[in-house]
Amino acid sequence: MRLGLFSLFAILLTACQQHTGIPLSLAFPAQGSVMNTQLGLILQKTDILKDAGFLAKVTGLGTGRELKVALVSGQADVILTSQTNFVVLLGEGYDARALGSLGSAGRYGLIVKNGRVNSLNDLKGKTIATIFGTSIHQPAMEWADAAGAKVVNIGSIAAMASALEAGAVDAIVSWDPYLTGSLDRQSAKLLKDDHFDLITVASNAYLAKHNEAAAKLKVALAKAVDYLRVHREEINREFGQMAKVGINVIDKASQSNQNYSAPPGSPVQQGISKKLRTKLNQEAEFLFHEKVIQSKPEIDSHIWGI
């Protein structure tokens, strides 16, 4: 009888231990930018979050809009997203905080079909497609202004690529890994490019309720980055299959991220630099001017740790 009670107690204790930890619902872009997708896949398949003290659910979502909706609706506590999605959340009045940045999300660039267009000047009077309210909105407007072109809003990267192929638009602004994929296939020519940044965004309500979560999550993300450094081929293959992009394209597109390209065991950089804060403030000004957001947020007050 004693053995039976002891065994029952041990079973109940084990069950309780398995269900303890800081609750966390984390969402990432399942077919999105480099690093965010790879790290999301790693956090899904490993015990990194559990070992960091979380009782976590990790979900891949299709678009930046879905990520923002998940955070605002309370379906996600934390999202791995882009600099622009963070600004849009704040500008729409949502109380969120940037926990850090893992660096470059790869390149975005202005591409055209191989043919007569060879420079920005050749786009005068022509049409450039972008996706409003995303990280490729502002550069599209700036490049269009420089070229004397007009800008149209198309809802997805796939739709933009189809429009370019069909000749419905003359140029599109794409991003990695799709940008690198188009260039490697030699199906497009690059006229202009730049980089955008990753942001880890948390609900302030979640952080207020779980005050240890931010620091623990940054530790977990650092471990996920180091896991990626060791298992690049495996993770990039999984990402490539979902995004329908070759594994070599994923690797090439990811090389611009200093955390990705560093050797295993190297320190993982997650700080939000003054330069990035300046970019975020400039983007807030732009999106407010374009009436994408209702108010212009003060960025520094929404960054964890400053």
Image (tube, grey):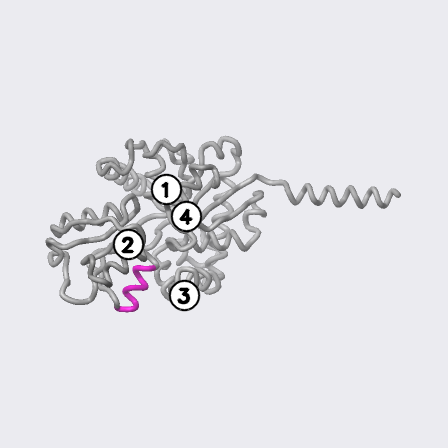
- Viewer-side residue, 203 vs 64: 64
Up-down: is 40 above or below 301?
below
Q: Amino acid at mark 3?
A: Ile
Closer to us: mark 1 or mark 3? 3
Q: Residue at x 40, y 32 (%)?
A: 95
Residue that carries the numbered disc 3 in the rendered image: 247
- The segment highlighted magenta reads 178-186
Q: Residue at x 39, y 63 (%)?
A: 244
- Quadrant (top left, top right, bottom left, bottom right) of the N terminus: top right
Q: Amino acid at mark 4?
A: Gln
Asked if marks 1 and 3 touch (Cβ < 8 Å), the reply is: no
- Classify residue 146 as left or right of residue 90: left
Q: Residues within 10 Å of mark 3 (few under 14, many from 20)?
A: many
Q: Report the Cα–Cα distance between label 4 and label 2.
A: 22 Å
Q: Residue at x 13, y 52 (%)?
A: 147
Up-down: is 105 above or below 235?
above
Q: Report the Cα–Cα distance between label 3 and label 2.
A: 19 Å
Residue that carries the numbered disc 4 in the rendered image: 269
